[in-house]
Image (tube, grey):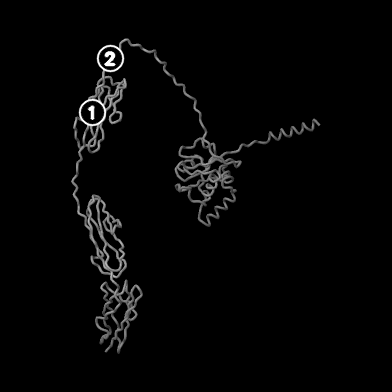
Amino acid sequence: MANKYGWLFLVIISFLSTTQIVSAEEFALIVNHRNAYLDNLSQMRNKVKKIFLKQNKKWPHNIGKVKRYCRGSNSSEQRAFNQFVLKMPMAKLKKYWITRKQRFGDSPPQEIKSSRVVMRLVAKSKGAFAVVKKTDLKKLPKNLRVLFMFSSTGRLYAYQKPVIIKPKKKVWTKPNPAPIIKNKVEEYKAVILHLEQPVKGYKTKNKRLKVKGFISGNWEKGTFKLNNKLIYIDKYGRFNTFLKINSGDTKLNLEVEDILGKKIRLSRWVSRTRTHRKITEKPIILSIQEPKQDTKTSESTLFLEAKVSGGNGPLAVFINQYRIKPNRQGQFTHQLKIKMGFNQFIINVKDKNGHKIQRELNIKRVAPKALKIILTQGNYLVSDEHKIMVKGRIEGGKGTRLLKIDGQAVTINKKGQFHATVMVKQGERKILIKVKDQTGKIAQAFIRIVGV
Protein backbone atom coordinates (compact mmCIF):
# COMPACT_ATOMS: atom_id res chain seq x y z
CA MET A 1 0.00 0.00 0.00
CA ALA A 2 2.86 2.35 0.86
CA ASN A 3 4.53 1.56 -2.46
CA LYS A 4 1.33 2.42 -4.30
CA TYR A 5 1.02 5.87 -2.70
CA GLY A 6 4.73 6.49 -3.11
CA TRP A 7 4.49 5.84 -6.84
CA LEU A 8 1.53 8.24 -7.09
CA PHE A 9 3.49 10.93 -5.21
CA LEU A 10 6.41 10.61 -7.65
CA VAL A 11 4.07 10.99 -10.67
CA ILE A 12 2.58 14.22 -9.24
CA ILE A 13 6.01 15.65 -8.48
CA SER A 14 7.25 14.91 -12.01
CA PHE A 15 4.11 16.45 -13.54
CA LEU A 16 4.48 19.65 -11.57
CA SER A 17 8.14 19.92 -12.50
CA THR A 18 7.40 19.63 -16.23
CA THR A 19 4.38 22.02 -16.12
CA GLN A 20 5.19 25.70 -16.56
CA ILE A 21 2.94 28.20 -14.76
CA VAL A 22 2.30 30.96 -17.29
CA SER A 23 1.31 34.35 -15.88
CA ALA A 24 -1.40 36.35 -17.71
CA GLU A 25 -0.10 39.11 -20.05
CA GLU A 26 -1.62 42.60 -19.72
CA PHE A 27 -2.23 45.09 -22.52
CA ALA A 28 -3.32 48.73 -22.75
CA LEU A 29 -5.27 50.64 -25.41
CA ILE A 30 -3.66 54.09 -25.72
CA VAL A 31 -5.14 57.28 -27.21
CA ASN A 32 -4.02 60.89 -27.62
CA HIS A 33 -4.33 63.04 -24.47
CA ARG A 34 -6.59 65.49 -26.37
CA ASN A 35 -9.15 62.69 -26.88
CA ALA A 36 -11.53 63.29 -23.95
CA TYR A 37 -13.81 60.29 -24.67
CA LEU A 38 -14.73 58.39 -21.49
CA ASP A 39 -17.48 55.83 -20.75
CA ASN A 40 -17.96 52.55 -18.92
CA LEU A 41 -15.55 49.75 -19.88
CA SER A 42 -17.93 47.66 -22.02
CA GLN A 43 -19.16 50.74 -23.93
CA MET A 44 -15.57 51.88 -24.59
CA ARG A 45 -14.62 48.39 -25.85
CA ASN A 46 -17.62 48.30 -28.23
CA LYS A 47 -16.84 51.82 -29.48
CA VAL A 48 -13.17 50.95 -30.15
CA LYS A 49 -14.28 47.77 -31.96
CA LYS A 50 -16.63 49.69 -34.30
CA ILE A 51 -14.04 52.39 -35.01
CA PHE A 52 -11.26 49.84 -35.68
CA LEU A 53 -13.51 47.88 -38.09
CA LYS A 54 -14.46 51.21 -39.79
CA GLN A 55 -18.13 50.79 -38.94
CA ASN A 56 -17.89 54.18 -37.18
CA LYS A 57 -15.85 56.92 -38.85
CA LYS A 58 -15.60 59.33 -35.91
CA TRP A 59 -15.00 59.41 -32.18
CA PRO A 60 -17.78 60.83 -29.97
CA HIS A 61 -17.84 64.66 -29.74
CA ASN A 62 -16.27 64.73 -33.27
CA ILE A 63 -12.64 64.50 -32.12
CA GLY A 64 -10.16 64.96 -35.03
CA LYS A 65 -9.50 62.51 -37.89
CA VAL A 66 -9.50 58.86 -36.78
CA LYS A 67 -6.21 56.98 -37.32
CA ARG A 68 -6.11 53.26 -36.58
CA TYR A 69 -2.81 51.43 -36.07
CA CYS A 70 -2.53 47.66 -36.14
CA ARG A 71 0.35 45.76 -34.55
CA GLY A 72 2.11 42.85 -36.26
CA SER A 73 -0.35 40.04 -37.15
CA ASN A 74 1.73 37.52 -35.17
CA SER A 75 2.37 39.83 -32.19
CA SER A 76 0.87 39.02 -28.80
CA GLU A 77 -0.67 42.51 -28.62
CA GLN A 78 -2.65 42.12 -31.86
CA ARG A 79 -3.70 38.53 -31.11
CA ALA A 80 -5.04 39.56 -27.69
CA PHE A 81 -6.75 42.64 -29.23
CA ASN A 82 -8.44 40.46 -31.89
CA GLN A 83 -9.58 37.90 -29.29
CA PHE A 84 -10.80 40.06 -26.40
CA VAL A 85 -11.70 43.45 -28.00
CA LEU A 86 -12.73 42.60 -31.57
CA LYS A 87 -13.77 39.03 -30.58
CA MET A 88 -12.75 37.82 -34.05
CA PRO A 89 -10.11 35.20 -34.90
CA MET A 90 -7.42 36.12 -37.44
CA ALA A 91 -9.01 34.11 -40.28
CA LYS A 92 -12.40 35.72 -39.75
CA LEU A 93 -10.77 39.18 -39.54
CA LYS A 94 -8.95 38.71 -42.87
CA LYS A 95 -12.20 37.59 -44.51
CA TYR A 96 -13.94 40.67 -43.04
CA TRP A 97 -11.39 43.09 -44.55
CA ILE A 98 -11.65 41.39 -47.99
CA THR A 99 -15.45 41.83 -47.93
CA ARG A 100 -15.11 45.42 -46.68
CA LYS A 101 -12.68 46.22 -49.52
CA GLN A 102 -15.03 44.82 -52.18
CA ARG A 103 -18.17 46.54 -50.86
CA PHE A 104 -16.90 49.89 -49.53
CA GLY A 105 -13.27 50.17 -50.68
CA ASP A 106 -11.94 50.21 -47.06
CA SER A 107 -8.43 48.89 -46.42
CA PRO A 108 -7.22 47.36 -43.13
CA PRO A 109 -5.31 49.63 -40.72
CA GLN A 110 -1.57 50.23 -41.13
CA GLU A 111 0.71 47.72 -39.34
CA ILE A 112 3.34 49.14 -36.95
CA LYS A 113 5.47 46.51 -35.18
CA SER A 114 7.56 48.81 -32.95
CA SER A 115 5.92 50.00 -29.72
CA ARG A 116 8.06 53.14 -29.63
CA VAL A 117 7.05 54.13 -33.19
CA VAL A 118 3.33 53.49 -32.61
CA MET A 119 3.36 55.63 -29.44
CA ARG A 120 4.96 58.51 -31.40
CA LEU A 121 2.29 58.26 -34.11
CA VAL A 122 -0.59 58.21 -31.61
CA ALA A 123 0.94 61.22 -29.80
CA LYS A 124 0.95 63.26 -33.06
CA SER A 125 -2.68 62.67 -34.14
CA LYS A 126 -5.70 63.74 -32.07
CA GLY A 127 -7.92 60.80 -33.09
CA ALA A 128 -5.31 57.99 -33.21
CA PHE A 129 -5.26 54.84 -31.06
CA ALA A 130 -3.30 51.57 -30.78
CA VAL A 131 -2.63 48.66 -28.40
CA VAL A 132 0.63 48.17 -26.44
CA LYS A 133 1.88 45.96 -23.65
CA LYS A 134 1.63 47.09 -20.04
CA THR A 135 5.42 47.01 -19.79
CA ASP A 136 5.59 49.74 -22.48
CA LEU A 137 3.64 52.12 -20.21
CA LYS A 138 6.82 52.88 -18.26
CA LYS A 139 7.94 54.97 -21.26
CA LEU A 140 4.48 56.47 -21.89
CA PRO A 141 4.82 60.16 -22.98
CA LYS A 142 2.77 62.91 -21.30
CA ASN A 143 0.68 63.48 -24.45
CA LEU A 144 -0.77 59.93 -24.33
CA ARG A 145 -3.31 58.36 -22.00
CA VAL A 146 -4.70 54.84 -21.41
CA LEU A 147 -8.35 54.34 -22.37
CA PHE A 148 -8.68 50.87 -20.78
CA MET A 149 -6.65 47.73 -19.91
CA PHE A 150 -7.27 44.07 -20.75
CA SER A 151 -5.41 40.83 -20.07
CA SER A 152 -4.87 37.58 -21.97
CA THR A 153 -7.43 35.95 -19.66
CA GLY A 154 -10.16 38.30 -20.97
CA ARG A 155 -10.35 40.62 -17.94
CA LEU A 156 -11.25 44.23 -18.75
CA TYR A 157 -10.33 46.91 -16.23
CA ALA A 158 -9.35 50.59 -15.85
CA TYR A 159 -5.76 51.78 -15.75
CA GLN A 160 -4.35 52.96 -12.44
CA LYS A 161 -1.24 55.06 -12.62
CA PRO A 162 1.44 53.75 -10.21
CA VAL A 163 2.12 56.03 -7.26
CA ILE A 164 5.81 56.72 -6.67
CA ILE A 165 6.53 57.57 -3.05
CA LYS A 166 9.62 59.73 -2.79
CA PRO A 167 11.54 59.72 0.49
CA LYS A 168 11.27 62.94 2.44
CA LYS A 169 14.37 65.06 2.45
CA LYS A 170 15.74 66.08 5.78
CA VAL A 171 15.71 69.85 6.00
CA TRP A 172 18.34 71.36 8.22
CA THR A 173 17.00 74.17 10.34
CA LYS A 174 19.20 76.74 11.91
CA PRO A 175 18.82 76.87 15.70
CA ASN A 176 17.21 79.99 17.07
CA PRO A 177 19.86 82.41 18.36
CA ALA A 178 19.73 83.59 21.88
CA PRO A 179 17.82 86.86 22.30
CA ILE A 180 19.99 89.97 22.39
CA ILE A 181 19.02 92.42 25.08
CA LYS A 182 19.71 96.04 24.19
CA ASN A 183 20.28 98.45 26.97
CA LYS A 184 19.82 101.47 24.71
CA VAL A 185 16.22 102.29 23.80
CA GLU A 186 15.76 103.64 20.26
CA GLU A 187 13.84 106.86 19.89
CA TYR A 188 10.56 106.63 17.93
CA LYS A 189 10.21 109.09 15.07
CA ALA A 190 6.76 109.93 13.76
CA VAL A 191 6.01 109.04 10.13
CA ILE A 192 5.43 111.99 7.79
CA LEU A 193 4.11 111.60 4.22
CA HIS A 194 5.36 114.10 1.60
CA LEU A 195 3.59 114.18 -1.80
CA GLU A 196 5.62 116.11 -4.41
CA GLN A 197 3.57 115.29 -7.49
CA PRO A 198 0.73 115.88 -8.36
CA VAL A 199 0.23 119.27 -6.73
CA LYS A 200 -3.11 120.58 -5.47
CA GLY A 201 -5.62 121.36 -8.26
CA TYR A 202 -3.54 119.48 -10.87
CA LYS A 203 -5.17 119.14 -14.33
CA THR A 204 -4.00 116.90 -17.16
CA LYS A 205 -5.11 115.48 -20.50
CA ASN A 206 -3.16 112.21 -20.12
CA LYS A 207 -4.61 108.89 -18.97
CA ARG A 208 -1.54 108.10 -16.84
CA LEU A 209 -0.79 110.21 -13.77
CA LYS A 210 2.66 110.30 -12.16
CA VAL A 211 2.62 110.03 -8.33
CA LYS A 212 5.94 110.95 -6.68
CA GLY A 213 7.09 111.69 -3.11
CA PHE A 214 8.87 110.33 0.00
CA ILE A 215 8.21 109.16 3.57
CA SER A 216 10.22 110.20 6.64
CA GLY A 217 10.27 108.73 10.16
CA ASN A 218 10.09 105.08 11.31
CA TRP A 219 8.52 103.60 8.14
CA GLU A 220 10.97 100.69 7.55
CA LYS A 221 8.60 97.88 8.61
CA GLY A 222 5.40 99.66 7.58
CA THR A 223 3.22 99.56 4.41
CA PHE A 224 2.32 102.21 1.84
CA LYS A 225 -0.90 102.09 -0.20
CA LEU A 226 -2.22 104.22 -3.06
CA ASN A 227 -5.97 103.76 -3.64
CA ASN A 228 -5.79 100.47 -1.64
CA LYS A 229 -2.88 99.12 -3.76
CA LEU A 230 0.54 98.42 -2.24
CA ILE A 231 3.30 100.68 -3.64
CA TYR A 232 7.03 99.95 -3.61
CA ILE A 233 9.26 102.21 -1.44
CA ASP A 234 13.03 102.19 -1.90
CA LYS A 235 15.53 102.10 0.98
CA TYR A 236 15.57 105.92 1.19
CA GLY A 237 11.79 106.09 1.61
CA ARG A 238 11.06 107.45 -1.89
CA PHE A 239 8.24 106.26 -4.15
CA ASN A 240 7.59 106.91 -7.85
CA THR A 241 4.67 105.23 -9.65
CA PHE A 242 1.99 105.78 -12.31
CA LEU A 243 -1.79 105.58 -11.94
CA LYS A 244 -4.47 105.30 -14.65
CA ILE A 245 -7.21 107.91 -14.21
CA ASN A 246 -10.58 108.37 -15.89
CA SER A 247 -11.94 111.58 -17.36
CA GLY A 248 -13.27 114.03 -14.80
CA ASP A 249 -12.25 114.36 -11.15
CA THR A 250 -10.26 111.57 -9.42
CA LYS A 251 -9.39 111.31 -5.72
CA LEU A 252 -5.97 109.99 -4.66
CA ASN A 253 -5.96 108.23 -1.28
CA LEU A 254 -2.45 107.63 0.18
CA GLU A 255 -2.02 105.66 3.38
CA VAL A 256 1.11 104.76 5.42
CA GLU A 257 1.10 102.34 8.36
CA ASP A 258 4.10 102.46 10.71
CA ILE A 259 5.60 99.86 13.07
CA LEU A 260 3.17 100.63 15.88
CA GLY A 261 0.12 100.25 13.58
CA LYS A 262 -0.60 103.96 13.34
CA LYS A 263 -2.02 105.07 9.98
CA ILE A 264 -1.20 108.37 8.30
CA ARG A 265 -3.55 109.34 5.46
CA LEU A 266 -3.33 111.98 2.73
CA SER A 267 -5.92 112.80 0.01
CA ARG A 268 -5.60 114.89 -3.13
CA TRP A 269 -7.94 115.63 -6.05
CA VAL A 270 -6.82 115.73 -9.70
CA SER A 271 -8.89 116.27 -12.86
CA ARG A 272 -8.54 115.01 -16.39
CA THR A 273 -9.96 117.01 -19.30
CA ARG A 274 -11.11 115.30 -22.49
CA THR A 275 -9.54 116.09 -25.85
CA HIS A 276 -12.21 116.21 -28.54
CA ARG A 277 -11.19 115.28 -32.04
CA LYS A 278 -12.72 117.16 -34.90
CA ILE A 279 -14.69 114.64 -36.91
CA THR A 280 -15.57 115.56 -40.47
CA GLU A 281 -19.18 114.49 -40.81
CA LYS A 282 -20.14 113.08 -44.19
CA PRO A 283 -23.75 113.56 -45.29
CA ILE A 284 -25.82 110.41 -45.72
CA ILE A 285 -26.86 109.82 -49.34
CA LEU A 286 -29.69 107.46 -50.34
CA SER A 287 -30.25 106.76 -54.02
CA ILE A 288 -33.18 104.56 -55.16
CA GLN A 289 -32.73 102.89 -58.54
CA GLU A 290 -36.03 101.00 -58.73
CA PRO A 291 -38.96 101.56 -58.46
CA LYS A 292 -39.33 105.23 -59.27
CA GLN A 293 -41.43 107.64 -57.22
CA ASP A 294 -45.23 107.52 -57.89
CA THR A 295 -44.97 104.29 -59.85
CA LYS A 296 -48.22 102.68 -61.03
CA THR A 297 -48.29 98.91 -61.30
CA SER A 298 -50.68 96.00 -61.37
CA GLU A 299 -48.16 93.65 -59.68
CA SER A 300 -48.59 92.46 -56.07
CA THR A 301 -44.83 92.64 -55.34
CA LEU A 302 -41.96 94.87 -56.45
CA PHE A 303 -38.24 94.73 -55.69
CA LEU A 304 -36.64 97.82 -54.19
CA GLU A 305 -33.04 98.36 -55.35
CA ALA A 306 -31.13 101.18 -53.62
CA LYS A 307 -27.71 102.29 -52.39
CA VAL A 308 -26.56 104.24 -49.31
CA SER A 309 -23.26 106.05 -48.75
CA GLY A 310 -21.63 108.64 -46.50
CA GLY A 311 -22.29 108.99 -42.79
CA ASN A 312 -19.97 108.04 -39.93
CA GLY A 313 -19.53 104.36 -39.25
CA PRO A 314 -21.90 101.56 -40.30
CA LEU A 315 -25.30 102.58 -41.62
CA ALA A 316 -28.59 101.06 -40.48
CA VAL A 317 -31.46 101.00 -43.00
CA PHE A 318 -35.13 100.66 -41.94
CA ILE A 319 -38.08 100.23 -44.32
CA ASN A 320 -41.35 100.73 -42.40
CA GLN A 321 -39.43 99.83 -39.17
CA TYR A 322 -38.07 96.62 -40.75
CA ARG A 323 -34.26 96.59 -40.67
CA ILE A 324 -32.25 95.92 -43.86
CA LYS A 325 -28.51 95.17 -43.85
CA PRO A 326 -26.63 96.70 -46.83
CA ASN A 327 -23.51 95.03 -48.24
CA ARG A 328 -20.01 96.50 -48.10
CA GLN A 329 -20.71 98.72 -51.11
CA GLY A 330 -23.89 100.04 -49.44
CA GLN A 331 -26.25 98.31 -51.88
CA PHE A 332 -29.41 96.51 -50.73
CA THR A 333 -32.54 94.96 -52.17
CA HIS A 334 -35.92 94.35 -50.53
CA GLN A 335 -39.19 92.86 -51.71
CA LEU A 336 -42.12 95.26 -51.29
CA LYS A 337 -45.65 93.90 -50.90
CA ILE A 338 -48.04 96.14 -52.85
CA LYS A 339 -51.68 96.37 -51.81
CA MET A 340 -54.44 97.53 -54.08
CA GLY A 341 -54.59 101.34 -54.11
CA PHE A 342 -52.09 103.80 -52.57
CA ASN A 343 -48.96 102.41 -50.80
CA GLN A 344 -46.38 104.48 -48.91
CA PHE A 345 -42.99 103.14 -47.79
CA ILE A 346 -40.86 105.18 -45.35
CA ILE A 347 -37.09 104.54 -45.63
CA ASN A 348 -34.88 105.69 -42.72
CA VAL A 349 -31.06 105.58 -42.81
CA LYS A 350 -29.10 106.15 -39.58
CA ASP A 351 -25.35 106.23 -38.75
CA LYS A 352 -23.58 105.51 -35.43
CA ASN A 353 -23.59 109.19 -34.41
CA GLY A 354 -27.39 109.35 -34.62
CA HIS A 355 -27.58 111.34 -37.87
CA LYS A 356 -30.37 110.12 -40.11
CA ILE A 357 -32.31 110.87 -43.28
CA GLN A 358 -35.83 109.88 -44.27
CA ARG A 359 -37.26 109.22 -47.72
CA GLU A 360 -40.86 108.44 -48.73
CA LEU A 361 -41.63 106.13 -51.66
CA ASN A 362 -45.19 106.21 -53.05
CA ILE A 363 -46.48 103.37 -55.23
CA LYS A 364 -50.01 102.91 -56.57
CA ARG A 365 -51.42 99.54 -57.52
CA VAL A 366 -54.13 99.56 -60.14
CA ALA A 367 -56.29 96.83 -61.56
CA PRO A 368 -54.67 95.16 -64.61
CA LYS A 369 -55.98 96.27 -68.01
CA ALA A 370 -57.66 93.82 -70.30
CA LEU A 371 -55.26 91.96 -72.57
CA LYS A 372 -55.47 93.50 -76.07
CA ILE A 373 -53.62 93.28 -79.41
CA ILE A 374 -53.36 96.52 -81.41
CA LEU A 375 -52.15 96.31 -85.04
CA THR A 376 -50.55 99.58 -86.14
CA GLN A 377 -50.92 98.74 -89.89
CA GLY A 378 -54.51 97.57 -89.66
CA ASN A 379 -55.86 94.06 -90.18
CA TYR A 380 -55.81 94.10 -94.02
CA LEU A 381 -52.50 94.25 -95.93
CA VAL A 382 -51.71 94.03 -99.66
CA SER A 383 -48.18 93.34 -100.97
CA ASP A 384 -46.48 92.40 -104.23
CA GLU A 385 -43.33 91.11 -102.50
CA HIS A 386 -42.48 87.71 -101.01
CA LYS A 387 -42.28 89.09 -97.42
CA ILE A 388 -44.09 91.68 -95.33
CA MET A 389 -43.45 93.22 -91.91
CA VAL A 390 -46.29 92.95 -89.37
CA LYS A 391 -46.16 95.52 -86.51
CA GLY A 392 -48.20 96.17 -83.39
CA ARG A 393 -48.26 96.36 -79.58
CA ILE A 394 -49.71 94.50 -76.62
CA GLU A 395 -51.65 96.32 -73.92
CA GLY A 396 -52.90 95.08 -70.56
CA GLY A 397 -52.35 91.65 -69.10
CA LYS A 398 -50.30 90.65 -66.05
CA GLY A 399 -46.74 89.41 -65.80
CA THR A 400 -44.79 88.00 -68.72
CA ARG A 401 -46.69 87.70 -72.00
CA LEU A 402 -46.12 85.12 -74.74
CA LEU A 403 -46.90 86.11 -78.36
CA LYS A 404 -47.24 83.85 -81.37
CA ILE A 405 -47.80 84.98 -84.99
CA ASP A 406 -48.78 82.23 -87.40
CA GLY A 407 -47.59 79.65 -84.82
CA GLN A 408 -44.12 81.19 -84.38
CA ALA A 409 -42.98 82.81 -81.07
CA VAL A 410 -42.26 86.55 -81.28
CA THR A 411 -40.48 88.69 -78.64
CA ILE A 412 -42.18 91.69 -76.99
CA ASN A 413 -40.06 94.63 -75.85
CA LYS A 414 -40.47 96.56 -72.55
CA LYS A 415 -42.95 98.97 -74.14
CA GLY A 416 -45.10 96.06 -75.36
CA GLN A 417 -44.21 96.56 -79.05
CA PHE A 418 -43.53 93.71 -81.48
CA HIS A 419 -42.74 93.17 -85.16
CA ALA A 420 -42.36 90.05 -87.28
CA THR A 421 -41.76 89.11 -90.93
CA VAL A 422 -44.48 87.02 -92.59
CA MET A 423 -44.25 85.19 -95.96
CA VAL A 424 -46.66 86.46 -98.69
CA LYS A 425 -48.33 83.96 -101.03
CA GLN A 426 -50.42 84.50 -104.14
CA GLY A 427 -54.00 85.26 -103.23
CA GLU A 428 -55.50 86.01 -99.82
CA ARG A 429 -54.11 84.57 -96.58
CA LYS A 430 -55.51 84.78 -93.02
CA ILE A 431 -52.91 84.88 -90.16
CA LEU A 432 -53.67 84.32 -86.46
CA ILE A 433 -51.96 86.49 -83.80
CA LYS A 434 -52.29 85.05 -80.27
CA VAL A 435 -50.98 86.38 -76.90
CA LYS A 436 -51.16 84.80 -73.40
CA ASP A 437 -50.30 86.47 -70.05
CA GLN A 438 -49.07 85.01 -66.72
CA THR A 439 -52.58 84.43 -65.35
CA GLY A 440 -53.57 82.37 -68.42
CA LYS A 441 -55.74 84.99 -70.12
CA ILE A 442 -55.65 84.88 -73.96
CA ALA A 443 -56.25 87.55 -76.62
CA GLN A 444 -56.48 86.90 -80.38
CA ALA A 445 -56.48 88.95 -83.57
CA PHE A 446 -56.57 88.11 -87.27
CA ILE A 447 -54.84 89.87 -90.15
CA ARG A 448 -55.55 89.29 -93.86
CA ILE A 449 -52.64 89.51 -96.30
CA VAL A 450 -53.28 89.59 -100.07
CA GLY A 451 -50.45 88.75 -102.47
CA VAL A 452 -50.65 90.50 -105.88
The residue most toward the front is 341
Horizontal side of 93 relative to 259 (left or right) equals right
18 or 181, which lies in front? 181
Mark sitting on residue 187: 2
Mark closer to the chain start, 1 or 2: 2
Q: What amino acid type should be assigned to the residue bearing mark 1?
A: Lys
Residue at far right of view: 1
Mark 1 and mark 2: Cα distance apart in space: 28 Å
Q: Nearer the viewer, residue 4 or 345?
A: 345
Q: How many marks?
A: 2
Q: On screen, 156 above or below 315?
A: above
Quadrant containing the N terminus is: top right
Q: What is the x, y in percent for residue 381?
A: 26, 86
Which residue: 58% across, 38% down? 25
Left or right: where 246 falls relative to 178: left
Label drawn at residue 212: 1
- Indicate the quadrant containing the C terminus: top left, top right, bottom left or bottom right: bottom left
- Element type at mark 1: strand
Q: Nearer the viewer, residue 380 or 268?
A: 268
